[in-house]
Amino acid sequence: MSKQHSGSCLCGEVSYTVDGPLREVLACHCTQCRKQSGHYFAATNAADDNITVKGAEHVKWFRASDTAKRGFCSQCGSTLFWKHDDHGYTSILAGSFDKPSGLKLTKHIFVADKGDYYEIGDDAEQFEAGS
């Protein structure tokens, strides 16, 4: 999908536009995503060169591992981004997009780590670890 998409954090201090294609949405059930969000992450991604962030000074980056970091608004705490050090793209949390996003969840990853309090009840493909 290659139209322009926009989104923001809850308080509006950080907003972004994506000019270019977005990947389908993946739901990540890994322990880190669950711990940060309180449930699981649902994210798409876009090439770094296609993302423009307004209010980037309010994005705080938390180094979650030796290879990746997670970006959130320092004002309201909204989780917005996930960035692997070696990739030329950034994952963007699907819930932060303005409607209509036109996005569709197609895969669940790290389902072996999912919380024990919920079941995955859709028809999206499931992977025990990454896809």
Image (spheres, grey):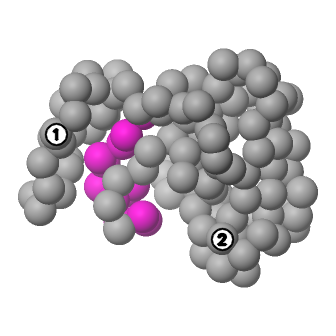
Relative horizontal placement of residue 47, taking residue 62 as reference (left or right): right
Give how far across and how far down residue 94 sits, in percent: 55, 45
Q: Which residue bears the numbered disc 1?
A: 121
In the picture, measured across the screen, residue 15 lies left or right of residue 34, that is: right
- The residue tagged 2 is 10
Magenta-tinted stretch = 26-37
Magenta-span inclusion, residue 107: no
* 47 over 98 or under it: above or below: above
Q: Residue furthest bottom?
A: 75
Q: Earlier in the sequence, mark 2 or mark 1?
A: 2
Q: Secondary structure at mark 1?
A: loop
Front-most of residues 38 and 102: 102
- The answer for how far apart the CA atoms under marks 2 and 1 are is 28 Å
Specify the quadrant of the image occupied by residue 76: bottom right
In which image quadrant can residue 58 be found? bottom right
Name the residue located 81 percent from the left edge and 71 percent from the top edge. Answer: 13
The picture quadrant where one finds residue 4 is: top right
Question: Residue 118: percent from the left, percent from the top?
Answer: 14, 56
Which amino acid does the dot numbered 2 rest on? Leu
Identify the secondary structure beneath mark 2. Answer: loop
